Amino acid sequence: MDIILLIELVALSITPFVELRGAIPIALFLGVEPTYAFLICTIANILVVPVMFSTLDRSYPHLSRFGFVKKALLRIERMSEAPVKRYGAFGLALFIAIPFPGSVAYVGTLVAYLLKIERGKAFTAIGIGITIAGVLTTYLSLKAAGLLVW
């Protein structure tokens, strides 16, 4: 695999709403070996988490003053609150792992921030959720392409 393709996959994996659920199928379509596609896209997506926490620390107090932003944040918080409050960090990991578009690193970190989950636990839970999402995405992509028989 050449460096340009690697950079493209990393860029796709850290792009909001594309993240690894879009990057892995594209990588497989481009002929990247499945293990490499999974590892590159998953690791890149996990690296979004500390950057997102840092960004939220600086921007949340300012952005939450806007009515439409506050309304959207409250909606995200309500949507995720039940599984996360009921199951804690495990619930956060499941929330991220479920193949729902846009619920990987960015939304997972936002949920952890809004629900004030301790950063170390949140990072671990988000990392586990992203890894599960990567495994599911890789499997389903290979299955859809007819490359898996089971």
Image (cartoon, helix red, strand yellow):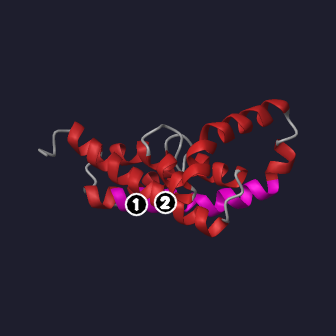
Depth check: give the residue in front, 61 or 91.
91
As for residue 57 lying within the magenta part, the answer is yes
Badge 2: residue crowd in 10 Å (few <14, some 14–19, many ≥20): some
As for residue 78 lying within the magenta part, the answer is no
Which element carries disc 1, helix, strand or loop? Answer: helix
The spot of residue 67 in percent (x, y) is 84, 31
Q: Is residue 40 left or right of residue 35?
A: right
Which element carries disc 2, helix, strand or loop? Answer: helix
| Image: 68 above or below 26 | above
Query: In the image, which residues are magenta?
Result: 38-58
Q: Are marks 2 and 1 in contact (CB under 8 Å)?
A: yes
Which residue is painted at 60% across and 62% down in the image?
122
Which residue is painted at 31% across and 49% down in the image?
138
Asked whether residue 27 appears in the rendered view, the answer is no
Q: Which mark is drawn over residue 40? A: 1
Q: Which mark is drawn over residue 82? A: none
The spot of residue 15 in percent (x, y) is 55, 46
Q: Which mark is drawn over residue 44? A: 2
Q: Quadrant of the N terminus?
A: bottom left
The spot of residue 109 in percent (x, y) is 62, 53
Asked whether residue 88 appears in the rendered view, the answer is yes
Residue at the farthest front position: 86
| Image: 38 above or below 17 | below
Badge 1: residue crowd in 10 Å (few <14, some 14–19, many ≥20): many
Please name the predominant secondary structure of the magenta segment in the image: helix
Q: Is residue 120 left or right of residue 27?
A: right
Q: Is residue 15 left or right of residue 75?
A: left
The spot of residue 92 in percent (x, y) is 55, 53
How much space separates mark 2 and mark 1, taking CA atoms? 6 Å
Depth check: give the residue in front, 60 or 9.
60
